[in-house]
Amino acid sequence: MSLVINFQLRLGFFRLFYYQDTSSWIDMKSFMEGFKPSKALLDDLGSMSDFKVAAKHQVRPVQVKELREERKIPTVNQHIVRKQFEWRDKSNKLLGTMTDKALAAKLRITKSMVWEQRKRLGIAPVEPLPMPEAGYHPIKHEWNDRKDALLGTDYDTVIGKRLGINPLRVTYRRNQMGIEPYIRCDRIEWTDDMLEFLGEVPDVDFADYYEISPRTAYLKRVILRIRSFETGHMPKLPDLSPKALVQLGIMNDVAIAAKFDTTRFAVRINREYRGIPIAPRELGPNQFKWNKRDLARIGKIPDKELALKLGVTRQQVTYKRRQLNIPVKQLSQPIEWDDLKLGQLGRTQDAMLAQMWKGAIGEIIAKRESLGIKEYRGPRKWFKKELKLLGTASDEEVGIKVGISATAVRNKRNSLNIAPFKPVKKVKWSKKHLAMIGTMPDAELAYIMKVHPSSVAKKRVELKIKNVISGMDSYR
């Protein structure tokens, strides 16, 4: 009951606080004007996460972040590294002269940082070059294998400048050969702290804080089956027909969306949720000349790694590998199914099982669906044989056995008042280590011997040696 009330209070606050259109981004300069933080809020800066400070004082996390950074107070999550960039007149003059993506590549920052600075200064985006229409034929240009190999490896404008031709000619040639355009994006590394707050605040606020798109946050929630903050409902996968599902990974997302009258995002969510890699567009045969040495390396290392070594796109390597019917380099190990693992299907999130077993989520989903087991929808039900495991091994080991996180095991163990597992390790005391007792803190000697500090303390009391820190006779 208290959990429901707490959720309703949080939801009511954010509904009152946010503007009607929560999907719109708010200019931080105008947003911070008139905001007067209390002394208690300022005292809490840096003592806990920005999200917890925001919840405690009923403000937005991004406001807390601005206040903390103004005062140069480090965050408690200092291991989360986010790019910083100092905007100067020279870089500001480039805003609006090229696409945000191109400028981000030039300045080596994220596209969202360019977008935010351009919005802050009220600069309109550059008009993109029009795509050539069907039947359009530019002035003939002599293309060769060396020039074709450049297509898709950088922006058309960059390649055009390098070859000394109009970028539209590059675009036309690339489309003619069926080569995907070059896309630069920063791969998001999801930390434990990010995952902890996912779903604890609205996606817009989460994305604003971590400088990612709200759609990316939503997609991650869908994959991990995390409830929405605004509604409290479990995210639902967009509906796709069985015929469309069969084509995932075989046809590219754009083609599937067009053929089955749906959105590309709906296709992408269903594909990534099932752990299916995107299908590359069929490329022209003359784009890259493969020699015997390069062909022998296909499938032995991941496509992306080989592409970097050869100086080509990942799609080119994937296309060639599929042409030769070479299986993809598996980063995850095949799951060895037993009765214990089969018993966890449908009782724990598929994504969590994949992490616990270090396997592919697609294999877990396929196995569950083949057995007619429904997807996990609610709190976990513990079996008697699983409860007997609590306290008999470390929480991490029990979690791996039953297919859940160590935190979930610890919470269940604590709710049943079961003591944690403490392995009894017999300590072998040498004359050298015995002579060191009492000359340094117990913890330091324990670190040297690679034992628990309590083992050193127990031996010190047994030998009636004073504590080096307090100087007291703890054995009395």
Image (cartoon, rainbow, N blue to C red):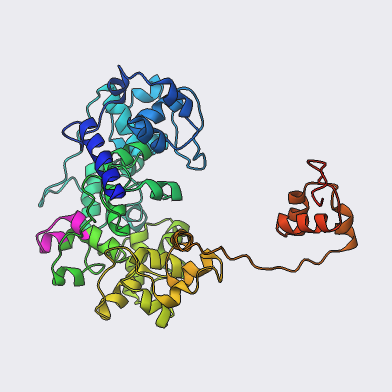
* Front in this rendered view, residue 349 or 142: 349
Residue 379, above or below 197: below
Residue 117, above or below 420: above
Residue 329: % across, % down:
43, 70
Residue 259 shown in magenta:
yes
Residue 130: % across, % down:
16, 41
Q: What range of the chain is rendered magenta?
A: 257-267
Residue 428 shown in magenta:
no
* Front in this rendered view, residue 168 or 43: 43
* Front in this rendered view, residue 57 or 87: 57
**For residue 118, which quarter of the picture?**
top left
Residue 436: % across, % down:
86, 53
Would you say residue 186 is visible in this rendering? no
Would you say residue 467 is visible in this rendering? yes
**For residue 459, which quarter of the picture?**
bottom right
The residue shown at (45%, 72%) is 387
